[in-house]
Image (cartoon, helix red, strand yellow):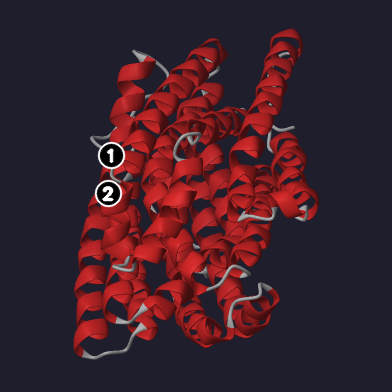
Amino acid sequence: MKTKRYEMDMCSGSVLKKMLAFSIPLMFSSILQLLFNAADIVVVGNFAGDNSLAAVGSTSSLINLLTNLFIGLSIGANVLTARFYGAKQEKDLKETVHTAIKLSIISGIILTIIGVVFAPIVLKWMKTPAEVRELAVVYLRIYFIGMTAVMVYNFGAAILRAMGDTKRPLYYLIVSGIVNVVLNLFLVIVVELGVAGVAIATAVSQCISAFLVIRCLVKESGPSHLDLKELKIKKEKLIKIVQIGLPAGFQGMLFSFANVFIQSTVNSFGPTIIAGNSAALNIEGFVYTGMNAFHQSTISFTGQNMGAGRKDRINKILVTALCCATAVGILLGGLALIFGEQLLGLYSKSPEVIEAGMVRLGVICKTYALCGLMDVTVGSLRGMGYSIMPMIVSLVGVCALRLAIIAVLFQMEKFHIIETVYYAYPISWGVTFVAHLSCYIAVRYKMNKDGEKYYG
């Protein structure tokens, strides 16, 4: 199976050099996506008011909660594609591509129904203030109408990443992102649609990115070619995707559930804290995506090497990714903290909102590298086919610990402050990283002793 211009053989040569070549376009893709998403917040905050800003910002945890289960399945598609690509198994690769895209369409339809029907109920449960809730419902319902496009793009991009291609998804995001910004400005400033305008712009741009990634796969030659007439789910491939992807999705949901619980706690402090928290969360996203590029590269690199039988490279892949993620987390986290007030000023001109945002940045950005370490270690485990184990560890180390801090420590009068809520994040990252690393060491020992094991 000949390696094409955009693809990458991850099973030979320098790990660091190839990982950087893979991760940098991925990093730019994520940062561009965040810039375009930030444009939503900036336009709303400056032209529709703080309540609209809070309405859009308060939905992020809920969106993640509802989508992470299915996004997790795209990780399963990534691992399986990488394995078959590394092993040069063309028939299995072709079946995986078609199964994954059909699954993405089904996932998107299910999410649209859930999001449109249950948005008001969940926002009320999250204690979203009345003056914000109605606007948030409008945003969520329009956003979820475009959810099929979101799923198709994520699954399609996961397939391309598994084969080493992170450049073309970057190009597609540039095109869709420019459309998003232009529509934002027109619909919010000119047409004065407020949060509805932002949601419409987002949905349209997501449809464009989905169309471009499908067009890319249709034009591909060889086993990665997508034939829309042959879209069908192969039971064997679906089972393997679910074996890896479903636990990964549950883990994402568990993270998001804890974050929704935390968001509901933040909501109890009122619109100013909500707006400051939302703006800071967007800034932190740039730091996270920088580190997350190495999490995703770890999955693809490990998957390809497992498929090619190059288990001797797995440790080096992990160590390289850990070092890179740490360096990025410290650098970008420090820059976000140093220029925090100026960056927050892009989202809101309110001194109170900026001050509230700096409180969050002061806690998170100093410790964000811990999150990168945790994610990279999980990526290595998933790349080797282990997904249930990190899910269980995350259930205890992230969700249970965060909820315990809110349920116990936060309820004490001395700690009933917003800082306690924010410190729940780095504490859970550190504890969970140590637990995941211990699992990795145990898995590698067992693998060396017993031979290959792709799923566990």
Q: Can you give x and y, in whole percent of width and height, for residue 73 in the image?
A: 59, 52
Q: Residue furthest front?
A: 414
Q: Residue at x 34, y 77 (%)?
A: 198
Examine the rendered structure and indicate whether residue 23 appears above or below residue 177.
above
Depth order, front residue of 275/381: 275
Q: Find the distance from the CA under tag 2 to the CA under tag 1.
A: 6 Å
- Picture quarter with the N terminus: top left
N-term-proximal mark, 2 vs 1: 1
Q: Is the C-beta separation of discs 2 and 1 under 8 Å?
A: yes
Q: Residue at x 55, y 38 (%)?
A: 79
Q: On the rendered structure, is 329 left or right of 27?
A: right
Query: Within 10 Å of the Cα at label 2, are there few (<14), some (14-19), or many (20+) other Cα atoms?
Result: many
Q: Which residue type carries mark 2?
A: Leu
Depth order, front residue of 439/130: 130
Res 180 → quadrant = bottom left
Q: Secondary structure at mark 1?
A: helix
Residue 166 in view: no
Q: Can you give x and y, in whole percent of width and height, for residue 394 in the image?
A: 70, 40
Depth order, front residue of 123/234: 123
Q: Residue at label 1?
A: 25
Q: On the rendered structure, is 154 left or right of 206?
A: right
- Picture quarter with the C terminus: top right
Q: Can you give x and y, in whole percent of width and height, for residue 120 in the image?
A: 62, 84
Q: Which residue type carries mark 1?
A: Pro
Query: Within 10 Å of the Cα at label 1, are there few (<14), some (14-19), or many (20+) other Cα atoms?
Result: some
Q: On the rendered structure, is 291 left or right of 265?
A: left
Q: Residue at label 2?
A: 170
* Residue 382 tag number: none
Q: Residue at x 48, y 46 (%)?
A: 94
Q: Can you give x and y, in whole percent of width and height, for residue 331 in the image?
A: 34, 30
Residue 280 in view: yes
